[in-house]
Amino acid sequence: MQSETQDPEAAVIVIDGHADTPQRFLDERFDLGDPLGGGNLNLETIRKGNLSAEFFSIWVEPTLYKGQYARRTLELIDAVKQQAARHSDRVEFVTSPEGILQAHRDHKFAALMGIEGGHSIESSLALLRQYYALGVRYMTLTWNNSNGWADSSTDIGDSSVPHTQDGLSDFGKDVVYEMNRLGMMVDVSHVSDRTLFRTLIISRAPVIASHSDARALCNSPRNLTDDMIRAIANSGGPNSKGGLVMVNFYSGFLSQSYLNAQRAMQPEVKQAVQALKDRARAEGREVTYAEISRLQRSYYDRIPRPPLSVLIDHIDHIAKVGGIDHVGLGSDFDGVFGQLPEGIDSPADLPKITAALTARGYTPEDCRKILGGNLLRVFREVEQVSKDLQPVETRPRLTEKQPFVKK
Ligand SMILES: [Zn+2]
């Protein structure tokens, strides 16, 4: 008799580490039940591709929302929860590895959240703790903007931006310690090289790169050198089974020739974006991020899409350098202006990745690890480190205001 667990396909948990759909929920009133409408992710494509779980990115654009980071963060968190509530027959909001498995057993899609960009905590451990309490289970220490306590790979060369001495300020170290204690995964995608290594030295739990590729194959500062891949794979202390690099599907991080073409186009795109902003200002309003994205996309769509094989090359490279237990998927769906390899447009296309890996000799067990098994293992270990630290980590952080004591 064929039981469900004997069918290897049925047992595979597919987890994607990063999708920027929450902005669509909020700014475009996009509903997961809607047709894609230019986006990458909805309930229909989730079902078609058997996607079990998604980490929805809580990303606050740092220029547009200056002075309102916490408010915008809370609105994005609320938008994810609203979607889960609206589709409660098919979607379960979860916050743990066990939650992902339970949702899978219940034939539901698991929605999780990760914050992208430490500026969301507005330099407050109290906000960090409250985001955890609301269900946020990873935080990317920076986005493209350095935030005063951690540096970004994107602006590290800009001398007009203040940067830390050693990659993390004392407060930045406190943030990493507090995330370890809470059980929030530390995400090093986007951070500068120095911030990455500094974080790996001090984190007591394994870290993830939720959406990053290999610099050896595509020379973007957003990508990871082989040394970084090995360091992430070895992260988390002597007893740890190590961290995880989740491969980003963005053509600009996958393909050197795509990246070169995009860089050549940059001055023209910059000019067009400025013109859009000027026009809006003349009309007495601010442009939305969606408008800017649409404009950028109209340019980038002219560059030929790289073949799916480049995405598989990155998975292959990271698996060879870091080990098969240290690679996963972090699509960046809805965050890359639709600039994805040929044939990859939504979660419905995920089985193509499994097929391509199989064609390259990856076993069903290897695929199970890449598609979600590795993330479940790291997530569980981060939870365990948190449990171990709770009793010994009750002191306030070095940089935290001491509670007022009544005389
Ligand atoms: Zn990102």
Image: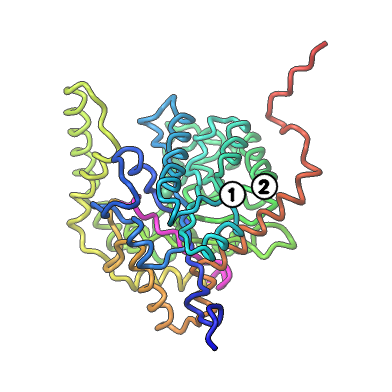
The residue depicted at 45 percent of the width and 70 percent of the height is 315
291 above or below 84?
Answer: above
Residue pictured at 68% horizontal, 29% vertical:
399
Q: Position of residue 395 (x, y in %)?
A: 78, 34
In contact (CB < 8 Å): disc 2 and disc 1: yes
In the rendered structure, which segment of residues is drawn in magenta? 321-336
Say whether residue 355 is visible.
yes
| Circle 1: element type | strand
Name the foreground residue: 76 vs 334: 76
- What's the image's color scheme? rainbow
Q: Is residue 30 magenta?
A: no
Look at the numbered disc 1 and say if its residue's Cβ is closer than 8 Å to ligand 1.
no
Between the C-alphas of marks 2 and 1, the distance is 8 Å
Q: Is residue 157 visible?
A: no
Q: Along the line of sight, which residue is nearer the eye, 198 or 111?
A: 111
Pointer 2 residue: 180
Q: Is residue 393 left or right of residue 7?
A: right
Which residue lies most toward the right here?
407
Single out the residue that lies furthest toward the bottom.
Answer: 1
Please tell me which residue is depicted at 70% across the width and 62% down the height of the picture.
Answer: 240
**Image quarter of residue 306:** bottom left
Q: Which residue was labeled with disc 1?
A: 186
Give the answer, above or below, for where 127 lies relative to 108. Answer: above
Tag 2, which secondary structure?
Answer: helix
Tag count: 2
Quadrant in the picture for residue 160 = top left
- The type of residue carrying mark 2 is Asn
- Find residue 273 and report its horizontal and vertical position in percent: 22, 37
User: Looking at the image, is mark 2 or mark 1 earlier in the sequence?
Assistant: 2
- Report x, y in % for residue 154: 42, 44
Question: Residue at position x 65%, y 35% from top?
Answer: 170
